């Protein structure tokens, strides 16, 4: 499979997941299948990050899209208020953080001084995030999901730091498929255990369904359609949210 076909598969799974999110009458297995969407997007992102001609432009694009999703969420919740709200939809933030840390680790391996400075800058951003309510009094009126869309936080994002760590593993093990598969399976087992401990029905471990597709990746990009995937994400969440609101 090419990255294009993997992304299309992820789009279908993501759409099913969000149908299940916004429409409670939808089959529960929509959400189960949806667990495989983000891992596929993450897999495609690290493959693309390894081959992009400009990582700076790549990261800037992801960060600007993160800002856009933050603004979109604020607008929709203010203009079309509902009990559940639009939700925290910002896939671009954890992808940005994953790419940033990949670059930081690789720079550290080449040049410890420069890499250490970049990691130190990341630490300062985390400190700045924690100080925002004190530095900007109005910041306390916004949720952590909103603030992290502007000042990226490693712990406060849609998928949490554990999925950023998974992204690092997918990148640095991309040429060692057997090891990648083993690490991914361990991650899925952890997800099952973590959710089971809280007494709920474990769901996130079903992301294991994405692994066979990752292992079929043939190293080819396939068709372009780059901007389709960037546009589809906010467009479909916005439309589904508004449709669910109109149906009451």
Image (spheres, grey):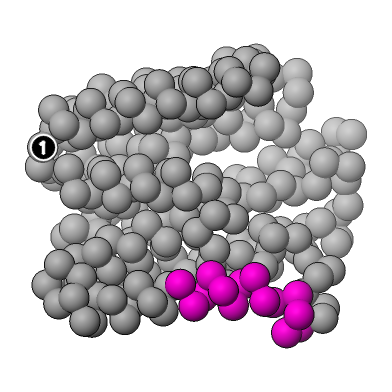
Residue 56: give x, y in percent of width and height.
30, 76
In reply to whether residue 135 is colored magenta, the answer given is yes
Which segment is the magenta one? Answer: 123-136
- The residue positioned 60% from the left and 45% from the top of the image is 236
Left or right of 62? Residue 173 is left
Answer whether residue 8 is visible to the viewer in this image: no
Q: Quadrant of residue 31?
A: top right
Left or right of 157? Residue 98 is left
Q: Quadrant of the C terminus?
A: top right
- The residue positioned 58% from the left and 30% from the top of the image is 17
Instruction: Please state which of residues 116 and 92 is positioned toward the viewer in this rendering.
Output: 116
Note whether 145 is above or below 100 in the view shown.
above
Q: Quadrant of the N terminus?
A: top left
In reply to whether residue 194 is colored magenta, the answer given is no
Question: Magenta residues: mostly which secondary structure?
Answer: helix
Residue 63: give x, y in percent of width and height.
47, 70
Residue 97: give x, y in percent of width and height.
42, 61
Q: Quadrant of residue 176?
A: top left
Q: Secondary structure at mark 1?
A: loop
Q: How many discs mark residues in the rendered view?
A: 1
Residue 153: give x, y in percent of width and height.
54, 63
Left or right of 136? Residue 163 is left
Answer whether residue 48 is visible to the viewer in this image: yes
Q: Looking at the image, which residue sits at the far bottom?
A: 135
Provide the residue designation for mark 1. 176
Instruction: Please state which of residues 199 and 72 is positioned toward the viewer in this rendering.
Output: 199
- The residue positioned 86% from the left and 61% from the top of the image is 79
């Amino acid at each position: 499979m090419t990255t294009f076909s993997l992304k299309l598969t992820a789009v279908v799974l993501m759409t099913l997941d969000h149908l299940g999110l916004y429409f409670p009458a939808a089959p529960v297995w929509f959400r189960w299948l949806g667990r495989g969407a983000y891992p596929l997007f993450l897999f495609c992102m690290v493959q693309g990050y390894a081959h992009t001609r400009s990582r700076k432009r790549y990261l800037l694009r992801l960060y600007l899209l993160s800002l856009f999703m933050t603004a979109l969420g604020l607008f929709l919740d203010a203009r079309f208020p509902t009990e559940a709200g639009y939700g925290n939809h910002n896939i671009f933030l954890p992808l940005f953080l994953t790419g940033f840390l990949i670059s930081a680790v690789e720079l550290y391996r080449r040049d410890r001084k420069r890499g250490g400075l970049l990691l130190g800058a990341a630490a300062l951003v985390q400190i700045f995030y924690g100080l925002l309510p004190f530095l900007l009094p109005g910041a306390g009126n916004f949720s952590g999901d909103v603030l992290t869309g502007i000042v990226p936080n490693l712990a406060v994002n849609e998928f949490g730091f554990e999925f950023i760590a998974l992204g690092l593993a997918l990148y640095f093990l991309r040429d060692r498929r057997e090891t990648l598969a083993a690490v991914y399976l361990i991650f899925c087992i952890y997800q099952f255990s973590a959710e089971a401990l809280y007494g709920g029905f474990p769901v996130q471990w079903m992301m294991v369904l994405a692994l066979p597709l990752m292992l079929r990746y043939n190293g080819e990009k396939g068709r372009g359609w780059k901007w389709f995937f960037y546009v589809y994400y906010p467009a479909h969440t916005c439309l589904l949210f508004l449709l669910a609101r109109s149906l009451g």
